[in-house]
Image (tube, rainbow, N blue to C red):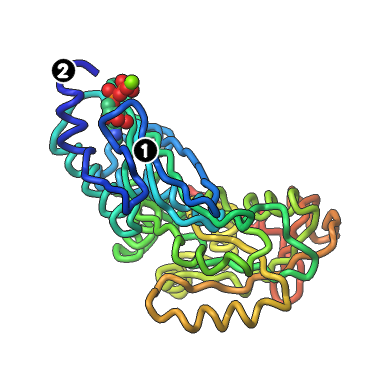
């Protein structure tokens, strides 16, 4: 960017960092120089958010700043890493100081919450897009991957499912929609835009979880990644899926059927919850550990199924794509084809 680029960096992005944060050199030189403790490994992830693809062009700047960091921190959580540093490449169509101030307010609100330091980036002119790269630390050999789930492991999910996808639906149908109550619509949109990365829970999973992933593309797809890498299958009991008060309320009001909710929870994206497996003999110790953590209120997680021997799930009742998937969904012990439960966005 021309003139003003350095003013912008200084005014909005440059904040003091120091050795305590592991930052020897932060913003202002050609590279940042970071200290990685000798018994740790560096976990690195990058996610881009492009206007019109990942967010609506008129999205609130605070929420965009927040979410562009949140999706990256969620990837660090999925590896069991402690978030430390982040870089930010931002392409702006013009310098809009009010917009930039709000973007940074959202970005740093989340960064400060988890003590994550912005250590560099790039500022250019063009169609609005944001690329964040987050770096975290994990004890050597302790990273949680997708490849170690074993038969008999219990499958857990953090938080609630389906709200992010419903938030997207509300946004797509825009203001004229009266599908849901105003409060619940807001709750769904908040879930979509103010994602909470599960970094606190992630720390507790190290040493217990055999595999972990964050749910960005829906339970079904993200669980499949674990199953493929770990060469196993899974059974999910739909009656155990956790739903928010907003979803339960909409079911009660008859605005959503159970099968529509399953559809969003299983196939919708943007929940950014952690999906992980714990060996059966470690489950009670893990639950006991959770019970000792009164400091945090974001550790809720639920048992939703188990890992089974690798097989192609076949069942007469299953007709569509899920018939050849390696996930068997059941409700009250009956197989359910979640893909044919028929949610129609325009009905
Ligand atoms: P270079 O030309 O060497 O790539 P730049 O002139 O692009 O460096 O950036 C100057 C300094 O400001 C660098 O330390 C860079 O990491 C930092 N920086 C640039 N844009 C951002 C941004 N959006 N957020 C954080 N740091 C930034
Ligand atoms: Mg340079």
Residue 90 shows in this picture? no
Marks 2 and 1, how far apart at CA: 22 Å
Q: Total marks drawn?
A: 2
The relative height of residue 90 versus residue 277 in the rendered view (above or below) is above
Estimate the x, y position of residue 103 in percent, counting from the top left.
24, 42
What SS does tag 1 mark?
strand
The residue that disc 1 covers is 87
Q: Is residue 128 left or right of residue 340?
A: left
Residue at 54%, 60% in the rendered image: 274
**Residue nearest the viewer, comparing 313 with 206:** 206
Estimate the x, y position of residue 309 in percent, counting from the top left.
84, 62
Residue 15 shows in this picture? yes
Mark 2 vs 1, N-terminal side: 2
**Residue nearest the viewer, comparing 103 with 36:** 36
**Residue nearest the viewer, comparing 18 with 245:** 18
Residue at 36%, 35% in the rendered image: 32
């Amino acid at each position: 960017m021309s003139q003003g680029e350095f003013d912008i960096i200084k005014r909005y992005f440059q904040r003091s960092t120091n050795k305590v944060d592991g930052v020897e050199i932060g913003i202002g030189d050609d590279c940042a120089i970071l200290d990685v403790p000798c018994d740790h490994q560096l976990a690195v992830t990058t996610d881009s958010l492009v206007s019109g693809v990942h967010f609506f062009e008129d999205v609130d700047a605070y929420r965009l700043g927040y979410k562009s960091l949140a999706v990256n921190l969620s990837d660090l959580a999925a590896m069991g890493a402690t978030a430390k540093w982040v870089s930010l490449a931002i392409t702006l169509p013009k310098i809009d100081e009010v917009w930039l101030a709000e973007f940074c307010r959202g970005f740093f609100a989340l960064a400060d919450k988890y003590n994550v330091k912005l250590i560099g980036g790039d500022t250019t002119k063009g169609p609005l897009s944001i690329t964040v790269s987050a770096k975290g630390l994990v004890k050597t050999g302790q990273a949680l991957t997708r490849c170690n789930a074993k038969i008999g492991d219990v499958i857990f999910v953090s938080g609630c499912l389906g709200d992010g996808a419903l938030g997207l639906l509300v946004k797509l149908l825009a203001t004229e929609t009266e599908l849901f109550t105003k409060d619940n619509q807001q709750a769904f949109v908040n879930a979509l835009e103010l994602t909470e990365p599960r970094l606190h829970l992630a720390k507790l999973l190290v040493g217990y979880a055999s595999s972990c992933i964050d749910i960005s593309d829906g339970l079904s797809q993200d669980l499949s990644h674990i199953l493929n890498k770990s060469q196993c299958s899974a059974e999910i009991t739909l009656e155990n899926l956790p739903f928010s008060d907003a979803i339960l309320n909409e079911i009660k009001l008859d605005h959503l059927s159970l099968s529509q909710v399953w559809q969003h929870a299983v196939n919708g994206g943007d929940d950014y919850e952690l999906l992980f497996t714990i060996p059966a003999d470690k489950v009670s110790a893990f639950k006991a550990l959770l019970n000792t953590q009164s400091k945090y209120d974001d550790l809720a997680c639920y048992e939703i199924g188990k890992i089974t021997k690798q097989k192609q799930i076949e069942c007469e009742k299953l007709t569509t794509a899920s018939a050849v998937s390696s996930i068997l969904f059941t409700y009250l012990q009956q197989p359910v084809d979640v893909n044919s439960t028929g949610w129609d966005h325009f009905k």
